[in-house]
Amino acid sequence: MAAEAGSALGLSVAVLAESPEDAACAVASEVLLGSPLVEGDMRALADRVDVVTFDHEQVDLAIIRSLRDDGAVIRPGLQTLQMAVDKAHMRAVLVEAGVPVPAHTMVEGGPEPRRGAGGPAAEAIARFGDEHGWPVVLKAARGGYDGKGVWPVNDMAEAAAVLAPLRGTVLVEAMVPFEAELAVMVARRPSGDMVTWPATETAQVDGVCREVLVPGRLPRDVVDRARVLGRHVAEIADAVGVLAVELFWSDGELMVNEIAARPHNSGHWTIEGAVTSQFENHLRAVLDLPLGSTAPQHAQVANVNVFGGPEGMDPVALLPRGLAVEGAHVHLYGKETRPGRKLGHVTVCGDDAEEVRELAWAAALSLGTPRAGGLRLPGALEHQSGTA
Ligand SMILES: Nc1ncnc2c1ncn2[C@@H]1O[C@H](COP(=O)(O)OP(=O)(O)OP(=O)(O)O)[C@@H](O)[C@H]1O
Ligand SMILES: [Mg+2]
């Protein structure tokens, strides 16, 4: 999606892809095959381009540092990437800056004696659970995405089972009884100039984003406070490019769950829903070009993700049904379908919150997306059977 935005501006985007099947290869101006975890591959990319940027955080900070020291322009920079790569570091930086975050502590992963007193990690988790209540949420500090690396646990036995195979730091945090999850997207230039899009309500099921609503159920004052907090976090992180700040709204308070230093699922709605998309502003920011307006173009926007269903139907084959839904902007990423894999998204813009949500879900279901357990579907869809 960034390559598509780049093409409109006459920019060429070279992508470092692990496989020629990667979705970005179909739209990039140039493809280099390789891994961001291999120094030679990253160097080959850096040699080809004016600026290196990212669409995920599975990167090696030592490689990034070495490229930067040799003069490569890497945006966002090391300070931001370090926060995005390591949730424990991110939390420490936010706490130090006085930003509200969920109650948490940190332990080291690994097997510990199950009998008797247990090891230091078990003891720390037991103490934390006694103080903050069960369940608690365990998170691998590194390597997680889409809920992989996040485990709610109900007791010490479950915690020990999660911890045993893990290595490295594990975040232990209170289960936040949030009214809503939200995200605010910020685009920031190297000069510190920044813009934010209106905060969005996001709904995650089993840690995976299923829908994004703008503004959703968020009251005006929460949207305003989220914007201020987002700008503050972007400054703390010294972000360049797009930064997604994921928040919990709980008991009238906002707290930061985590950040992502790249365009993010919470901002896909901006392609049709805002004057400038997150992808275009990401490129403008990392190239130090003037940023575009983030004003929404519609009162209500709904973005529903498309996932592979149990029958393994390719959503492309279902386009005749999905595109029959009035106003549905369908984006399919060209990924091979697998049950539960995120394959695309649908955006619908309009004036009525319930109507845009219903149309976006109708299109996503028509494209084979399974229903989301625990998420009430709008209107008539709730009672329809099947996936269509
Ligand atoms: N402390 C918490 N209390 C309640 N729910 C939580 C908590 N931490 C995480 N969650 C739920 O799990 C989801 C995934 O957690 P988190 O965003 O930390 O992990 P992730 O896998 O890195 O996600 P992403 O897909 O954004 O990369 C959250 O969006 C939220 O729904
Ligand atoms: Mg998250």
Image (cartoon, rainbow, N blue to C red):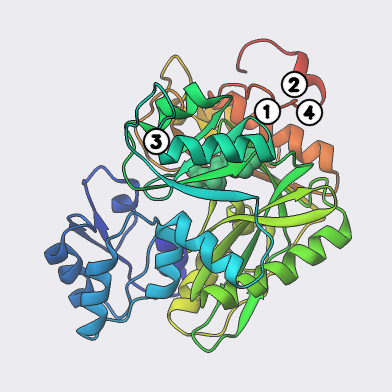
Counting from the top left corner in percent of width and height, residue 221 is at: 87, 62
Q: Name the quadrant containing residue 365.
A: top right
Q: Residues within 10 Å of mark 2 (few under 14, many from 20)?
A: some
Three-letter amino acid code of the residue under disc 4: Pro
Question: How far apart in space, not on screen, are marks 1 and 3 (Cα)?
Answer: 51 Å
Q: Quick one: label 4, few (<14), some, or many (20+) residues within 10 Å?
A: some
Whether residue 301 sits left or right of residue 13 in the image: it is right
Percent position (x, y) of residue 327? 69, 42
Residue flagged by tag 1: what amino acid is it? Ala
Q: Which image quadrant for residue 194?
A: bottom right
Q: Secondary structure at mark 4?
A: loop
Q: How many marks?
A: 4
Location of mark 1 (residue): 362
The quarter of the rendered structure image containing the C terminus is top right
Are the residues tagged 1 and 2 within 8 Å (C-beta)?
A: yes
Q: Which residue is mark 4?
A: 378
Is 175 situated above or below 65? above
- Residue 111 % position (x, y): 32, 32
Q: Amino acid at mark 2?
A: Leu
Q: Nearer the viewer, mark 4 or mark 3?
A: 3
Q: Specify whether residue 10 is in view.
A: no
Q: Secondary structure at mark 3?
A: loop
CA separation in Å, label 1 and label 2: 7 Å
Which residue: 67% across, 75% down? 293
Up the image or down, 191 lies above or below 207; here it is below
Q: CA distance from mark 3 to mark 2?
A: 50 Å
Determine which residue is flagged by label 2.
381
Where is mark 3, residue-wise?
A: 119
Q: Position of residue 53 (x, y in %)?
A: 37, 69
Looking at the image, is mark 1 or mark 3 earlier in the sequence? 3
Marks 2/4 in contact by CB < 8 Å: the verdict is yes
